[in-house]
Image: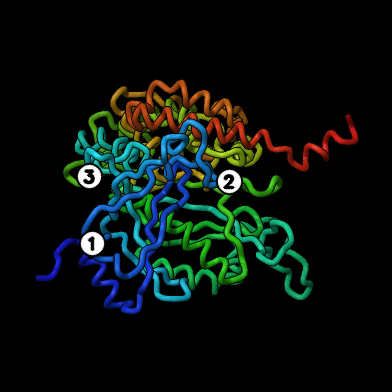
Amino acid sequence: MANDNPLSVELRRLLRKQPQTATMELLVPDVGGILRGKRIRRSSFEKTCDEEFWFCGGTLLMGTLGAVLPGMVGDGDGDPDVPCRLVPGSIAPVPWAARPTAQALFRMFEKSGDPYFADPRAVLERSIAPLRKMGLKIVMATELEFYLLDARADKPTPRASRVPGLGRPQPGPQVYHPDDLWEIEHFLDDLYDHCGVQGIPADAATAEFAPGQFEINLTHIDDPALACDHAVLLKRAVKATALKHGFVACFMAKPFAEDSGSGLHIHMSLVDRNGKNYFSHGRDSLAVPPFSSRLRYAVGGLLKTMAESTAIFAPNANSYRRLLPENFAPVDTNWGVNHRAVAVRIPEADETNLRFEHRVAGADANPYLVTAAIAAGVHYGLKNKCDPGRMIEEGERVSLKTRIPDRWEPAIDRFSKSKILPAYLGDEYCRYYAVNRREECRQFHNVVSPIDFDWYLRAV
């Protein structure tokens, strides 16, 4: 009798479409949202779908350069393996591979069978559990900004449109210019094809606020973990597709000092047991445009937890080059309707689609952890009826006050002293995260860079 294990059914479905598939990549997101893993051969496909396998748990706590950091799992403890299982629904072809290849996401567990404390998927599940206990379901989507760089250039150079007949780069950002999308039409066509094959619900594409900068939106779904899967797999697809077309895709938060930074924007709403938008209904409905005090409380919780969550929204040294008030980036704990200069924006929407857009995280952030921190803020706000303060009015000019940490070390310090997040993300994970980011911060700032010589060699 055929194996009815859902993963085995997925595998058979893939092999019917790609019978020559001989290799499968097994992928897991680490603390930085970077996909790590290994490849297996055809002879191991069925066993991997049916049984747990083992992989080193320290993988999830490595630094950005893929090295074990002091104090992490894997540092002097023999780098122990932990049991792993594939994520149902994640088996898919790798359409850009030279030979038929498959991929699948996996997750890690403790030997007790509980989710592994350092698995970002487990952190997210733990954080959204209080909302689920309230009978609320998260509906969300992500928007990812990125640059396309010229792969043939000697230094990082944005792909720039040319002025017709002159051959010179087009000056100005030319935001939302449709011709910029026509000029990368073949890249976009391949990207949408690749996303379609992999089940990634890629939607609208826009040319953004700098030459060579673009945004891809994903559609709303009611499974936060799957939405985050889509985000990390979209980044992977964008990078692979870009290389085929002579580009390098850059998801750094601020690759160029004079140009716009790249964000990871999270759109989120809540749905109650009856399928109604939780933010649209309630006895305390008093706002214009119409949303209930529940949305105000949720936003209040987001603003209350924003400073201590900044180390998650801005996890790297480069992240803080984006968080400057003059860079059109959210640096204040503010909110408003139909206003893109605030940290939490309420887009124009009817009562069914009412939601907030969280705009603080950079494109370099881990979407699982970002979503976990946002869910924590929402629940905390609802539970404690947090007042978000005065709303920034549509069209109002926003002050340039910075009320969240704008440097790496203070952000880590604020996270380490958090009184709210550990209850949602887990005490153990928060401790490890702070040590991980602090050690990488130390290593980064110990590097002597060319700017040291530019500033000090002759002058001092």
Local crowd size for mark 1, using a 10 Å CA cut-off: few (<14), some (14–19), many (≥20):
many
Front-lying residue, 10 or 210? 10
Q: Residue at x 40, y 35 (%)?
A: 373
Name the mark nearer the viewer: 1 or 3: 1
Q: Label 1: which residue?
A: 7
Q: Which residue is mark 2?
A: 253
Q: Nearer the viewer, mark 2 or mark 3?
A: 2
Mark 1: secondary structure = helix
Structural distance between the alpha carbons of marks 2 and 1: 36 Å
* Colour approach in the figure: rainbow
Residue 346 visible (yes or no)? no
Mark 2 and mark 3: span between their CA atoms? 36 Å
Q: State the SS at label 2.
A: loop
Q: How many marks?
A: 3
Q: Amino acid at mark 2?
A: Ala
Question: Viewed as shown, does residue 371 lie left or right of 399?
Answer: left
The kind of residue tagged 1 is Leu
User: Which residue is the site of mark 3?
Assistant: 276
Q: Which of the 4 image quadrants contains residue 291? A: top left
Callout 3: 10 Å neighbours few (<14), some, many (20+)? Answer: some
In-front residue for pair 363/351: 363
Report whether 125 appears left or right of 397: left
Q: Residue at x 73, y 69 (%)?
A: 163
Residue 56 visible, this orientation = yes
Observer-nearest of 326 and 75: 75
Type of amino acid under label 3: Lys
**Where residue 255 sits: x, y (%)?**
64, 49
- The quarter of the displayed image where residue 449 is located: top right
Quadrant position of residue 346: top left
Which quarter of the rendering shows the N terminus?
bottom left
Placement of 21 over or under 327, stated as above or below: below
